Image (cartoon, coloured by chain):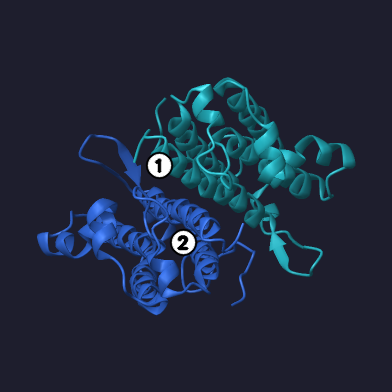
Chain colours: A blue, B cyan
């Protein structure tokens, strides 16, 4: 896999959305490169009882992107069914530690890819002005659309940092 | 400290550079919030022999920003003196584990702030077209200016994820 180290507007989107997609996709390329050679045992390994497995962190990355699709594109909270479907990877912790495992790497990559495909399809219909549209969270703090998608990237990078730390403990890298 | 959850162009810069600065500064606000209550003992704690202390990770964040200033604004490698000054936090590992410690939180915050002030001063003189200027690394892979500053943010978020994991092991958070 070849990673592109140029952030520039990707065609098929308006200019700034194309740049945001460039950042989102670069982030994902680096994540996929980071996990490319992991075995099912690596994905399930728990380095200590308060840590998360790499598999759970990958599902968490997909779950955060899903939640942001709902908030950003549909301007609503999760339905009960959606919450039930994504609760474990979204919240991590003990239940995720007990339940997310026994899957090969492709299972996680497929979930990441499916979620990303929907993000990209929805972003093609938006324009740069939309990025600045503001809303407020329930506690009254304002955010904008640009922030929501910045945060999807931020959360992925944050957890990729944790994946690296787990890999180091498994003696898989620096 | 109040964190702004809107990514939008900050005045004093051209439009896209102002948005990039918004992302860099949001990233930093969250990092500072993450470390706000840490003691010197927290900053020096080593959770296992292959980990990095939070203090060393904070110096690493400053060192990566410094290196990117040199590459981006001066288009050169570090001088021997600069390399000697920053080698430990830049490379982390055993020597950093032995040498970066015994400093209060303000020491790290000051280094972060000083480095950031220089980044912002230099970015005021650049324009959006500059973001797309390309160059190549010594192994021939192309990058552009936008990527360099995206990566400063990416590296900080990545290490903030590790700071969070260390804090969790020290029972300071989730």
**Label 1 – label 2 distance at C-alpha:** 15 Å
Residue B125 appearing in the image: no
Point 22% across, 56% down: residue? A95
Q: Residues within 10 Å of mark 2 (few under 14, many from 20)?
A: many
Image quarter of residue A139: top left
**Circle number at residue B76:** none
* B142 to B128, vertically: above or below: below
Point 22% across, 62% down: residue? A86
A84 relative to A169 in the view: left or right? left
Give coordinates of residue B90: x percent, y percent: 70, 44
Q: Residues within 10 Å of mark 1 (few under 14, many from 20)?
A: many
Image quarter of residue B164: top left
Give coordinates of residue B138: x percent, y percent: 82, 64
Point 24% across, 64% down: residue? A99
The quadrant of the picture occupied by the C terminus of chain B is: top left
Q: Nearer the viewer, residue A45 or B147?
A: A45
Residue A17 appearing in the image: yes
Q: Nearer the viewer, residue B111 or A107?
A: A107
Q: Nearer the viewer, residue A147 or B157?
A: B157
Task: Return the residue at label 1.
Answer: B6
Point 37% across, 74% down: residue? A117
Image quarter of residue B106: top right
Task: Return the residue at label 2.
Answer: A17
């Amino acid at each position: 896999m070849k990673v592109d180290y140029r952030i520039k507007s990707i065609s098929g989107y308006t200019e700034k959305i194309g740049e945001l997609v460039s950042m989102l996709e670069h982030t994902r390329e680096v994540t996929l490169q980071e996990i490319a050679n992991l075995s099912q045992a690596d994905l399930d390994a728990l380095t200590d009882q308060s840590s998360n497995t790499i598999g759970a962190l990958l599902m968490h990355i997909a779950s955060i992107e899903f939640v942001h699709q709902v908030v950003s594109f549909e301007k609503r909270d999760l339905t009960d069914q959606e919450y039930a479907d994504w609760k474990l990877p979204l919240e991590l912790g003990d239940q995720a530690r007990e339940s997310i495992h026994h899957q090969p790497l492709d299972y996680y990559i497929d979930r990441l890819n499916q979620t990303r495909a929907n993000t990209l399809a929805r972003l093609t219909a938006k324009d740069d002005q939309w990025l600045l549209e503001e809303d407020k969270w329930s506690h009254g703090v304002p955010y904008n659309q640009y922030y929501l998608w910045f945060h999807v990237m931020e959360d992925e990078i944050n957890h990729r940092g944790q994946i690296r730390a787990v890999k180091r403990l498994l003696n898989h890298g620096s």
